[in-house]
Amino acid sequence: MADGFKPALIPAAQYLRMSKDHQRYSIRNQARVIAAYAAERGYTIVKTYTDPGESGLTLRERTGLQALLADVIKVERPYERLLVFDVSRWGRFQYLDEGGHYEFICHAAGVSVSYCAEMFENDGSPIMALLKQFKRYQAAEFSRDLSSKVLYAQLLQAKIGHKLGGPRRYGFERILVDEHDQPIQKLKPGQTKAFNNQRVVYAVGPEHEVKIIRDMFTWYTRDRMSFRGIAQRLNQMGVPAGDHPTWGEARVRHLLTDELVLGIYVFNRTTQKLKSKRRKNAPEELVKTKILEPIISRTQFESAARRRKIRRHHVPPEENLAAVARLFKAKGYLTGKLIDECPYAPSQHVLLQQFGSIHRVYELVGFEPSGWWRPPGQERPTTKEEMLAALRRLFERDGYVTEATINAEPSVPSAPDYQYKFGKLTNAYRLAGLPYKQGDLQRLGFERLRARRAGEPPRRISLPRWSEISERYTDEELLDCLRRLHREHGYVTAKVMRADPDTPTPVVFIHRFGTLINAYGQAGIENRRFNIWSRAARARAEVAAQRKAGTTAASTIQPRIT
């Protein structure tokens, strides 16, 4: 070798990860050891991947390792070797093969891995493989041992009444105390303790917040308000929500279920050991410590708890049925409103989900309803045909039918009765000859809304226009009506059909041919919606232009259709 000749340095990358467990693994110390190893072995660092302050239990939050694995599999990369401080820097994975998997990805891509602080060379020998697996086990065991120690210390602090993490709760304050539990100061939002020997405890908060909590329990237990209703009332009153911008249903539920209002601090509700999936702990694993005087009575808190329980869907059907039977025994009859207002019975919604219908619940508890209320002397409809006839009469009177109008009319069976007999209301509408499709119902609703806003009476639709009159027309006569309208106007739409006094309503064509588009096709008229709308728009525009020019009277204009 000639004097002064220096071999070319081998380009290498380094991976640095520091968790919060030990100063020995700081980023600076790792980089210093790797730099000394590279200088001794003839490597030059051309790329650095860093995960500062990240746990080694998962890959999710480690952007540095993710970038390393993404770059190492590329065909073009600026390095041939990867330098790592030790085996544990891959991670303290509880599944030992996960760290080996990431090393294998590098090896398969042609990038060898060197451990700079280990006592062995990563040369692929059997002894080396055994030592690496042992090191991975040590790394995983370190995390498990540390997790157990931290949890034990937290449970010990909770048992003596010290608060562990999290913001302040509405109606309470966080007080910083020293090692002798002597108060130092009140913590503001975002502030935390400064020294390890300091602790945080709860204290009763401002009087106006305590009053709001008491009002919330009163509204929920006495006035039977829902969580959402309480939140809406608080927002309407302009009551501040503490550290949150506004009140919400979840926040109200949290306050009404928190035992801190009884002066009891509860800890260890959930567990998420070693970055695993969070799970709820069993009641016997909870730590409950009396730390304050209660601001809510035990009786009122338990009353709220009972109401929450009967409204939950996971209560067994047998318990809900027993509550309804108890209500029936006390009152002698049952109604949907009576069930909803009962403090110990489930709501109708829960019963419908568990038993299918409210009639099934009545049958199981032995209640036989005498029917809906009706004026004296009025006969109750007993057959489906009579129920459909009552529905037609209601439509003739109002010009439309909705669930609200059905329930408000005493001479007509209630909407649940129609649902029980026909499956759903739209089936009853269809069998009665009423508009039943979603589009038709929405269109009629929009027409009523526009009329109400304009101060005009709603357009009356007579039922015989599509039931009795439909029987007077043959298919060919209906198609001739469409052809006549097309000759007169140059196009045919539902609006043109309704405006013509000699043409049945569009519902007749829909019942006879399925859809208006099908009717247009059988009549030999353009049946593509876009073309129909385009032709109608051009015809109306031409009429408007002729009116503006004053060329002819509007009543005699015949638009030219190209």
Image (cartoon, helix red, strand yellow):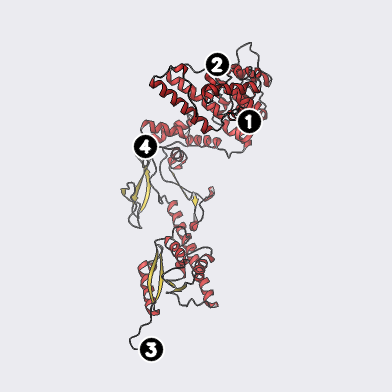
**Of callouts 3 and 2, the N-terminal one:** 3
Which residue is disc 4 drawn over?
209
Tag in front: 1 or 2: 2
> How far apart are the two marked residues, 4 and 3, measured between alpha carbons?
85 Å
Where's residue 439, x and y in %? 54, 29
Quadrant in the picture for residue 4: bottom left
Task: Say which label, 1 or 2, has the lower sequence index.
Answer: 1
In whole angstroms, how far apart are the C-alphas of marks 4 and 1? 43 Å
Q: Is residue 410 visible?
A: no
Q: Position of residue 196 (x, y in %)?
A: 36, 58
- Mark 3 vs 1, N-terminal side: 3
Q: Tell me where residue 96 appears, x and y as whole percent.
A: 53, 66
Residue 143 spot, x, y in % from top left: 47, 63
Q: Secondary structure at mark 4?
A: helix
Q: Which mark is residue 476?
A: none
Q: Which residue is mark 2?
A: 501
Residue 257 higher or lower than 360, as above or below? below
Q: Crowding near pointer 1: few (<14 within 10 Å), some, many (20+)?
A: some
Residue on which disc 3 sits: 1
- Secondary structure of the residue carrying tag 1 is loop
Query: What kind of element bears circle 3?
Result: loop
Q: CA distance from mark 4 to mark 2?
A: 68 Å
Question: How many neighbours does mark 4 have within 10 angstroms: few (below 14), some (14-19), or many (20 or more)?
Answer: some
